[in-house]
Image: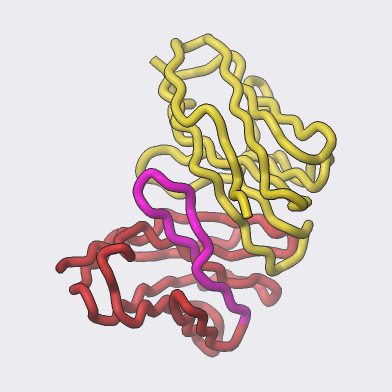
Amino acid sequence: EAGVAQSPRYKIIEKRQSVAFWCNPISGHATLYWYQQILGQGPKLLIQFQNNGVVDDSQLPKDRFSAERLKGVDSTLKIQPAKLEDSAVYLCASSLYGASSYNEQFFGPGTRLTVL
Amino acid sequence: DAKTTQPNSMESNEEEPVHLPCNHSTISGTDYIHWYRQLPSQGPEYVIHGLTSNVNNRMASLAIAEDRKSSTLILHRATLRDAAVYYCTLNNAGNMLTFGGGTRLMVKP
């Protein structure tokens, strides 16, 4: 079974530029998550989708971050414009079911973003 | 959000058992305790989870205190490949994980 795919793996941009990350979850997984992991910290949830609807985006900085999951399959996360503090690893995860107390999340390898 | 507290780092010798503690004193009755680990340059991977009873799987064991305010992840025989950051997280009814800083486990040969 293929895992969660993310691209690109690495991205370097100047501040105020735009950047987009792509995620393809495990086939059949209803729920998709985007996390931000700053160096030395645990991942922080940015947004959760169930199918193509947003379940929670309370920690997404909506003035510069946006995300979509068209057709309930793959997803893109965009930052426009980027700031220095956005330098982090952006992780995508998926889980088979929606909101339930037990539901293992499968993580992709992440995209490491460096903003100069 | 319910929070977890873990030691920043721990050290173990190869082939010996490792007990990784976690405090979650504000856990609610419906929160599951999940453990994930993150190897260098990889995304986190699921290790084990539990609600009230102790749990065993092929990777580890999870011991949960009777009052559920703490738990311990047990690796029965640490190997060099177990060197990673271990996260204790609480999974609420919305299936959203809140990660703390984790414990960096170092395994000495």
Residue B85: where, in percent of width, then height? 36, 57
- What coloring was used for the rendering? by chain
**Residue bounds of the magenta highlight:** B36-51
Residue A36: where, in percent of width, then height? 53, 38
Q: Which chain is yellow?
A: A
Q: Is residue B50 magenta?
A: yes
Residue B37: where, in percent of width, then height? 44, 60
In the picture shown, does residue B92 fall above or below A77?
Answer: below
What residue is rendered at 47% in x and 41% in y?
Answer: A37
In the picture shown, does residue A30 fall above or below B4?
Answer: above
Quadrant (top left/top right/bottom left/bottom right) for the N terminus of chain A: bottom right
Relative depth, front residue between B2 and A82: A82
What residue is rendered at 73% in x and 58% in y?
Answer: A96
What residue is rendered at 33% in x and 78% in y?
Answer: B19
In the image: residue B102, left or right of residue B98 = left
Count every numbered label the image shows and give the total.
0
Quadrant (top left/top right/bottom left/bottom right) for the C terminus of chain A: top left
Relative depth, front residue between B50 and B59: B59
What residue is rendered at 50% in x and 68% in y?
Answer: B47
| Residue at the far left in the pictured view | B109
In the picture shown, does residue B17 fall above or below B87?
Answer: below
Q: Which chain is red?
A: B
Residue B45: where, in percent of width, then height? 50, 58
In the image: residue B80, left or right of residue A77 = left
* Quarter of the view holding residue A95: bottom right
Q: Is residue A29 magenta?
A: no
| Residue at the far front in the pictured view | A1
